[in-house]
Amino acid sequence: MDSSKPAKVVKDVVEAAAGKVTDVLTPDVPGAPGSAPPPFDEPTTPHGPLPPKEEQGAPDTRTPTGAETGVPKIAKGQQGAFLTTANGARLRDTDHSLKAGPRGPVLLQDHHLREKITHFDHERIPERVVHARGAGAHGVFVAYGTAEEVTRAGFLKKGTETPVFVRFSTVLGSRGSADTVRDTRGFATKFYTDEGTFDLVANNMPVFFIQDAIKFPDIIHAGKPHPDREIPQAQSAHDTFWDFVSLHTEAQHHTMWNMSDRGIPRSYRTMEGFGVHTFRLVNEAGATVLVKFHWKPKLGVHSLTWEEAQLIGGIDPDFHRRDLYDAIESGAYPEWELGIQVFPDTPEETFAGIDLLDPTKIVPEELAPVQAVGRLTLNRTPRNFFAETEQVAFHLGHLPPGIDVTNDPLLQGRLFSYLDTQLTRLGGPNFTQIPINRPHAEVNDMLRDGFHQHAVHAGVAPYRPNSLDGGNPFPAGDRENAFVDTPVTVAEAPKVRAAPASFDDHYSQVRLFWLSMSPVEKEHIIRAYTFELGKCYHQAIKERQLQCLANIDPVLCEQVATGLGLPAPKPTVPLAEVQPSPALSQVGREWPADGRMVGIVVDADSDLDGVSEVRRAVFAAGMVPLLVAAHGGTVGDLPVQRTFATGRSVEFDAVLLAGAPAPAPDALPARDDKAGAARSTTVDPRVLLLVEEAWRHAKAIGAWGAGAEVLRQAGVAGTPGVVTGDAGAEVFGAVQQLMGAHRVWERFPASVS
């Protein structure tokens, strides 16, 4: 390939590979992710790697000691037209692990899986490859005893208290990225049980992008920033992500969850958690059931609006981390109930026609209710972020007696990957000896030496059987509650790289999720798809994803296509007939408002006695009042926490107006951009902006006394969720009632039903 003529090479390669091009590179418009536009259909004609873009360079090709080699810079890149192993052996398939039959367990002999996963696991040092941006907290789990019939796990026996450490995280961003990006969130819990550590590695979405762990490097490579420019950070609104998910349609269910409000939670405290996989529980009699794990937040599920997320990303990139730690410090301890959906352990491993081994599927709660088995309370923040939150290591193979895995091919691969990744990230095999990872059970494992070995082992015989150490350690039996790998029969089958036919349904549950949304939530999903696809450079990728949306719902497809200025394609598969699941919607219920922030706008002329009474009432309700004034210090005897210059509406869950502050001396566009053009000679423009934003984000607003004038000038008086009254306590009482629904939903317009 003649790299001196990149334009000709690109043209020849694209024409040979696809025969047509659905969009063109525009030299005057930068931002194309690759050196050639992609065709609509997946390319199938083999050809060599495309040349680099014209503006891309590379380091000199020198030896380790600095000598010139004379080798062209392009020689450092990948070579050849075909997929190979690291040793150059050509591969037929990289989408399916080697299994004992389509539904059987993954085989350890799968050298391609091991090489691919191992290499992927060691791509980042020392930052986590995924879930790099995280926040952790300590707490306690108390079991209700309601799971004793289905599992012998000791930590689930009634009244048992188990210390825990929980790490919340985003998936795609680096450690320095913002909290409020649209992304999946991790919800990993380490239970320090007296029978060994149990790691429940969950997400805030119950489905995953892929069905087989061998594809995990592919989806993460696609979702991460483009490798040439390292942008965009912590986002899926770019070509490589949508290129992958539009070609790999099993990702559409997770993508729909991500485009919904679930992709931008209001707080870790208002976020559900899901174990994603199906696990097997074993009781004292040896009987088994299949289960899915759920975390249900005490405060309900609540999300940010897209505008709030963008504003917060600039104002406070640590918003979720700060909210978590502030809540714990103020005594508003975050709480979740752990629940399980229970299914019979049948040979088919299905329930209501849903394949329980497919991690891209859910079982609607209306078909299998979530049964509460215990309560988690987070009550301590880390003392040292690195020593605890950064070094904590989770592994799905950390299982206590009574909990076992299934043949879910994604879970099977993760059982290898999570252990393997610690070798590089934490410097060796002794990562369990780091204080945050140490078990709260006796350890006598016969494992010796290695990097970072902190134990000082006694004895001379770390093997079994032995007589020199008196036979110690001894194997445990049933009386000692030893862990038992459930003796599940593996069906006789040939080794194949394949998936069961039930994994082929990529659209019915996505349609179920869409039809379960309220009109407001549907509008937000349409907006998210339109924004994300609008950020893609290539028309072909937009058109391909629109085809996926057409196979989910015609209304969704048409609305997104309209926003993109493209025609809406027709479905290529029959639309599934599904029954909506109300449990999937975030709208329509009421929740506690513990730990919420209430902004109270005051000035020297305000009813300060009324403000004092409201502050006491807010504290008594388990929320935090923040006084907002023209300057810091105090107003009267009341402390000011925010000023018109430093405060912003997105910090507050509700706004109260105790006065109508006149423009302060610094209410100048040159001094504070929020001042903008003066819209009023009597009210500070930043107060008007605060009220307008809070109203636009459907937050409860209340005013008394002169504060009613602010509502009038902002143009929101008399609208839904805006309360006025004669006294502050009266107004706050009404606002508190409104906050139970999280937002004043009727304020959001909806054009779809």
Image (cartoon, rainbow, N blue to C red):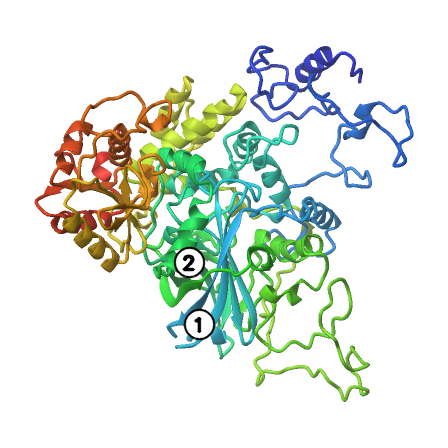
Q: Secondary structure at mark 2?
A: strand
Res. 363 visible in picture: yes
Residue 674 place in picture, x, y as percent: 34, 28
Crowding near the residue tagged with mark 2, few <14, some 14–19, many ≥20 C-alpha atoms within 10 Å:
many
**Residue annotated with mark 2:** 294
Question: Quadrant location of the N terminus?
Answer: top right
Whether pointer 1 and pointer 2 mark residues with C-beta atoms closer than 8 Å, the reply is no
494 w.r.t. 707: above or below: below
**Residue annotated with mark 1:** 150
Q: Amino acid at mark 2?
A: His
* Displayed quadrant of residue 703: top left
Q: Secondary structure at mark 1?
A: loop
Residue drawn where x is 42% and y is 75% of the image = 148
Residue drawn where x is 58% and y is 39% of the image = 219
Q: Amino acid at mark 1?
A: Val
Viewer-side residue, 725 vs 616 = 616
Residue 494 place in picture, x, y as percent: 68, 53
